[in-house]
Amino acid sequence: MSAKNIKSAVSLTSYFFSLPKAHYLLLGIIGLGILFGLFLNFGTPAETYLLQALIDGITLLIAPALLSAIVIKLLIRKMPIRRILATALGGEFVYAAAYAVSLMLVDVNLFLAELVLLIGAAIVFVFWYAIARLVFILKYRSIIFAIIQLLFYLIFFFSNQALYTTDESFISFAAKFGLSSMVLLGALMVFFQIINAPMKKSFGFSSTDAATYFVNQWLYSNKDLEKAFQSVGQEVKTLVAVMGFKRKKDTIFFVTPYVHYGPFGNLGGSEFSYLIEKKMQEKYDARSFVFHGTVTHDLNPVASSEIRKIMGAIDGIIKDAEYAPAEAALTIGRDNECRAEALRINDSAMIGLTRAPLVTEDINFGLGLSMIYSAERFVKNVMLVDQHNAETGEITSFEPGEPIGHSYLRATKYSVSSKAKKQKLKMGISKCNCTSPMLGKGMIKIAAFSTDPYYILILLDCNGITPKFRDIIEKEVVALGNKRDEKWTVGIFTTDTHQTNMVKGVLNPMKEEGSILEGIKKGVVEARDDMQETKFFGTKRWFDINVFGAKQSIELITTVNSIVAVAKITAPLIALVAILAILLALALTSKML
């Protein structure tokens, strides 16, 4: 998949933003109205200036904006007032601009002044309709809400007439407002038809439906978008690797399902890094570390219900598990910038891959299988893990045939082919229940192993980590070991969970946070002090699962980019034709009336 195409599609998320708090939006509505009133009455006598400015600001902008927001809030009480006020403020701003331009033209050409006013009203009408349809998720009532705000502005404008006086009747003026709005709404419908066609042809649902599903998940955590995923998903075979560590009073599992924890929010497999851990706790009363396998977005599960297939494979593995006394060693392979950390236990190895401080991103499943098969020439069973511990902002993935892929292959081979001095396996664990917007529900888990040097494994349930914070954590933890006269090697892993991904936050790695660092340091000491003799087993199992798939991923990104390209050309043309149509309709209406 082209990295350029991925970046182009992802860049669309930069247009999303978080809304200010409701009271700021309210102040914005009032402030804009007052400023407009001051502008409108500039040059009037000082003794009446402020009063008249306030009256005009309230009647022309503030009152219709607030009344529209209040009525719509009463009609859809579940809708947060912040979103309604934001829409009202956006509409008010367009009206203010249209009023201002119209005022400048009124002495030059009354017809043009009226045309600008009608176009402004039509733009706000369409704006309200589009927001109600795509964001408020109102299929039929969206047109009603657009009409409500139009009527309020029309009534107050006609009753005030501060901009210019007209002899037209209210019905005549309302007809012009309505006609111009309908013309622009028709243009929007034509635009929707054009941009809907590529998505409909490729996936069976329209672009506007996809946008509605997307917003519905973003704002309300609704999973309707999964229905679209399921309709285009494909069944694939993949692996789940499990390692079990049985201590005197408890059992710990390392689990790596070779699926991707995406796409975002609560959709598909986005929460699997936490949900698998939760289900293991409920079913086996066991603590679990769930890692990121060598997979890309091609293996995003189409629905959260697909977790049952992963758990079915895990259940089969645990049912057949045979624990044995174990010895462990840590060996590290390097090739160019690629590093493979192999925790070798008996005839198994857990191998973590990283390029830190260079970007450490998703690894193609086929390339990962090549590394597994290569390593299994030296050990019987391999759990291969993408440490995903250096997020530099570069959107990419590592594919077969690339130089980086070859370096990863050689580093993996070196990590398990070298001689290792094994120690009797002891393991200690801890969990850090820190809080951070960048941290998923799985929090932070730490494991300490009795290798030489000690291996301190830190797993953060987050969407990557910055190289700087990774280095800080490693240095601080190594320093803790030095204080105990012990040599520690630190392995930092993230799950790359996409449950923390915001719409604009496609890249939201864990950054430097003092509370997180202190929690990790405390947890490391607890894990080291918790070390106990441990028995071990490890194996893998194939299973079937429905995922979005490589072909669909490529096709979706290509389709989105083509829609954007078409929209950039057609939107201005349709807008121009609509304005000309409004001009013609206004001219004909003026003659008839």
Image (cartoon, rainbow, N blue to C red):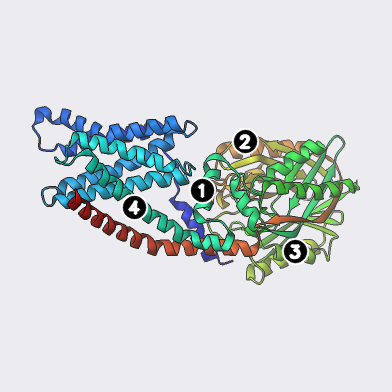
Residue 473 position within the rendered picture, expressed as x and y whole percent measured from the top left: 62, 45
Q: Amino acid at mark 3?
A: Leu
Q: Which mark is residue 232?
A: none
Who comes first in sequence, dot 3 or dot 2? 3
Spatial distance from mark 1 to mark 4, Cα to Cα? Answer: 21 Å
Q: Nearer the viewer, mark 4 or mark 3?
A: 4
Who comes first in sequence, dot 3 or dot 1? 1
Q: Which residue is mark 2?
A: 434
Residue closer to the observer: 230 or 275: 230
Residue 356 position within the rendered picture, expressed as x and y whole percent measured from the top left: 61, 57
CA neighbours of label 1 inside 10 A, class few (<14), some (14 to 19), many (20+): many
Who comes first in sequence, dot 1 or dot 4? 4
Q: Residue at x 85, y 49 (%)?
A: 316
Q: Amino acid at mark 2?
A: Cys
Q: Which residue is mark 3?
A: 369
Residue 442 position within the rendered picture, expressed as x and y whole percent measured from the top left: 67, 40
Q: Nearer the viewer, mark 2 or mark 1?
A: 1
CA neighbours of label 4 inside 10 A, class few (<14), some (14 to 19), many (20+): many
Who comes first in sequence, dot 2 or dot 1? 1
Q: Residue at x 71, y 65 (%)?
A: 366
Q: Amino acid at mark 1?
A: Thr
For the residue labelled by badge 1, is the local secondary structure a helix, a strand or a loop?
helix
Q: Which mark is residue 184?
A: 4
Report if the CB atoms under discs 3 and 1 are less than 8 Å apart: no
Figure disc tally: 4
